[in-house]
Amino acid sequence: MAFWVEQAGWFSSIQDLGRTGYEHLGLPAGGVMDPFACRVANRLVGNEDSAAVLEFSGAGPLLWADAPALLALCGGGFTLYVDGMEMPLWTAVRVRGGQRVECRPSPAGFWGVLAISGGWDVPPVLGSRSTFLKAGVGGFQGRLLHSGDWLFSVREGWVPEERAGAMLPASLRPEYSLEALIRVVLGPQRAWFGEDGERQFLSATFQVGVQSDRLGYRLTGASVTRRSGEILSEGMPRGAVQVPPDGNPIVMMADHPTTGGYPKIAGVICADWGRVAQLRPGEGRVRFEAVTVDQAHQIYRELMARLNAIEQENLSFWMRG
Amino acid sequence: MSSMFPDWIQPCGDTSLLVILGEGISVSINRRVHALAKGLRERQIAGLGECVPGYATLRVDYDPLVTSLDDLIRSIQSVLESSYDENLLPAREVVLPVHYGGEDGPDLPFVAQHTGLSEDEVIRRHTAGVYPVLMMGFLPGFPYLGGMDESLATPRLETPRQRVPAGSVGIAGKQTGVYPLESPGGWRIIGRTHLTLFDASKEPPFLLQPGDVVRFVAVEG
């Protein structure tokens, strides 16, 4: 079930749901930028949610299949072509040996994930297959994919035929657009911003700056008033919105530093981590809306319940064989 | 029903809490941070995620599908009220051999000039210190060390270097630290250790952990 990489794309790396248990030692969890897309893609092809996927942005990979497999392209920014034929997204697609698999850029969204039946096979490092580029850890030899690389599935030769054609119903797919309303929980440093700072933060439309990457998304075009100075360095989770002295917020993404010294005005709720990631740097715009922690947990439960819909919607399809 | 936060526990998004145990850099507050992290891990609370120490705070991550927020807050309160004892934490001592000056420590002359000390005296005072690892972050394996002799304080470089080699020992303001990886950086580099602070392929991958105590010993290059 090998795949030969003819073109790697611009920023293609192996990722999974992240590396847990090392953040107190300074190693970020990392993992996919859009966790919901990763979970869906894996379920469609019969994997655990945490199996490794290929993630890319900007320009997608061009692969040659050496043997049959199920593939699913989820997330944003790309369309799947097999031997030049457009294939449906959020759907398990069967490919045969000798076929050309291409992920071509499309306008909505920014990060694509490609899952394969069995999961992409790279050695787990510290419990995860995610690539952490800054330290050259994990993934495909600690680096981005290059043309000429060979990729394999963990389960060579495994094709769960009954899942071919399985899909996430269109009504349950995330909508990626150039502007998003992102939900946050305010805090923990509310006193640093006061009512004025919070009002500015919740009423402004920010642009996603071009200097955004897997570590953080830098927001420009509006600023937030804050006290001067720094806080003592402290733990900083994914989704935290730091505000440096210039008032332009930074949203912490998958490979963010585990600690930071700028005050945090809010944290993006985990259901929206992927929705922020899918805003295109240089083009995307974002506004924020405050929710309570309890509301955020309810939103997350509803999002995770969509995953179960994959099994329910496709059950009759699979039983027909 | 809405979750209630005491004012010393703040939400940080919907999967993390910040437990605030004090303000300022103090070894005694910091030891309570490490003791709370240890106490929470030992309770094996379902859905408990990362416990990341800061100087005076602990970041506690949780899985909201598994952990009830109210239960987690009660567990934190219970660990703080119970038998947890900061003195029970073993302070492991790790000795880092350092070659000071020369190519390994290009800023040693500047630090000597800035502090008005001789280079030998900078080395003597730097190796005389006992440095608790108060927290880790910035890079994998990077220790934030307390306890530097304040007479060694030197401001950062005005323009950071593009490349600081792994193992470089530096001073930034009143802090001292060691770069675990080659990285851009603005600290004044006074020496270098050959020990590896982080290598994912080694067991254990990290030389240091929060709560350790570091000493530096001068060696010939």
Image (tube, rainbow, N blue to C red):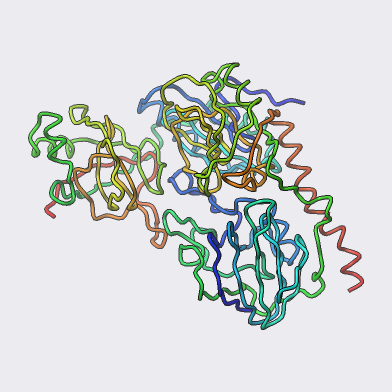
Tell me what residue is drawn at x 63 percent, y 20 percent.
Answer: A199
Give the farthest residue toward the top: A195
Instruction: State the image coordinates of residue B84 (x, y, percent, origin top left).
Output: 48, 31
- Left or right: residue A312 versus residue A242 is right
Position in image of residue B107 (x %, y %): 18, 41
Residue A198, quarter of the rendered image = top right
In this picture, residue B154 sits left or right of residue B17: left
In this rendering, is residue A273 above or below B13? below
In the rendered image, which quarter is residue B212 located in?
Answer: top left
Residue A130 drawn at (x, y percent):
54, 58
Q: Nearer the viewer, residue A126 or B37?
A: A126
The quarter of the rendered structure image containing the N terminus of chain A is bottom right
Image side of residue B12 versus residue B116, left or right: right
In the image, residue B57 sits, relative to residue A37, either above or below, namely above
* Label tally: 0
Residue drawn at 66 percent across, 55 percent down? A77
Q: Quadrant where the C terminus of chain A lies?
A: bottom right
**Which residue does the image show at 55% across and 22% down from the upper left?**
B8
